[in-house]
């Protein structure tokens, strides 16, 4: 049985739910661990379980602000994610090998003007930056919005496959009701064409590789 990980959940103080409560439900669903990736203005210092990985999801309005925040948080957290959806932010994140995850590359609900393309996904593969497929974007959308989100995810999946960039499935959970069991997440991923073996890997082997920095170069160059 694979060890499943959800690398994008949001807990207190960003939301009302303690991270320990999210972990308890996630473990009941079959997860081995979760990563708390609160946005950089609502980080928590207190984590009490070795099944919880401390991360941060950086929001930035410019490439220079993003680089400054990456430098600030690098080495202080287990996972460094960037909130995408803007073309310049997407590129800056994927060009930077210090970043672990690009979350919401097309915006949190697929509404952003940012898109992935061949050049950007090549950077993701080269620098070991995992592309996040946020399944809550599907769950909380309806009709035309859902169709648009699924189309974008299908296009992103084709690029990720072609260039063999790492990809992960996440819940972007903000409450226990946002969490889904791995088998449900694998079923949801099939809606945009992800095969069962791909989805299983995107919840197990690849998240573990992200945590272990498996795709990072042995000697990273500090980007000023």
Image (cartoon, rainbow, N blue to C red):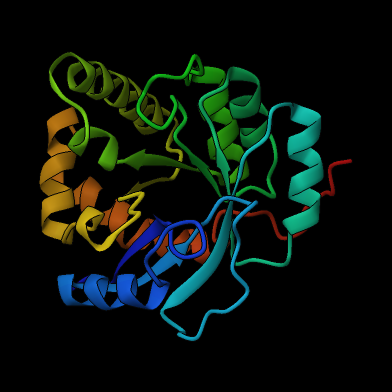
Q: Which residue lies furthest to the right in this view?
A: 224
Q: Judge by depth and name the residue closer to the eye, 85 or 163.
A: 85
- Residue 99 placed where, x, y %? 63, 47
The answer to whether 122 is drawn above or below residue 32 in the figure is above
Which quadrant holds the N terminus? bottom left
* Quarter of the picture holding the C terminus: top right
For the question of whether residue 2 can be seen, the reply is yes
**Relative image position of residue 212 (x, y in whole percent):** 54, 67
Question: Which residue shows up at 55% across the image and 28% down it?
Answer: 122
- Residue at 37% over, 66% down: 17
Q: In this view, does 223 lie above or below 36?
A: above
Left or right placement of residue 75 versus residue 104 in this view: right
As drawn, is 132 to the left or to the right of 217? left
Q: Which of 158 and 30 is in front in this view?
A: 30
Query: Above or below — where is 6 with respect to 57?
Result: below
Q: Would you say 28 lies left or right of 175 here?
A: left
Residue at the extreme front = 16
Can residue 194 be seen here? The reply is: no
In front of the other: 38 or 185: 38
Q: Position of residue 45 (x, y in %)?
A: 63, 74
**Residue at screen point 68% across, 45% down:** 97
């Amino acid at each position: 049985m694979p060890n499943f990980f959800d690398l994008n959940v949001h807990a207190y103080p960003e939301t009302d739910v303690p991270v320990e409560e999210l972990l308890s439900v996630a473990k009941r669903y079959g997860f081995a661990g979760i990563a708390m990736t609160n946005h950089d203005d609502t980080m928590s210092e207190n984590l009490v379980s070795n099944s919880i990985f401390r991360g941060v999801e950086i929001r930035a309005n410019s490439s220079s602000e993003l680089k400054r925040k990456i430098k600030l948080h690098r080495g202080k957290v287990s996972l460094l994610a960037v909130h995408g959806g803007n073309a310049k932010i997407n590129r800056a994140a994927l060009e930077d090998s210090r970043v672990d995850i690009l979350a919401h590359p097309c915006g949190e609900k697929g509404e952003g003007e940012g898109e992935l393309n061949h050049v950007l996904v090549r950077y993701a593969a080269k620098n070991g930056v995992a592309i996040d497929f946020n399944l809550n974007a599907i769950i909380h959308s309806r009709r035309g919005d859902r169709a648009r989100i699924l189309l974008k995810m299908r296009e992103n999946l084709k690029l990720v496959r072609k260039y063999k960039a790492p990809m992960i499935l996440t819940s972007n959970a903000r409450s226990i009701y946002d969490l889904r069991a791995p088998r449900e997440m694998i079923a949801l991923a099939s809606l945009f064409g992800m095969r069962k073996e791909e989805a299983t890997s995107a919840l197990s082997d690849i998240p573990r590789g992200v945590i272990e920095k498996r795709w990072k170069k042995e000697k990273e160059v500090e980007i000023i």
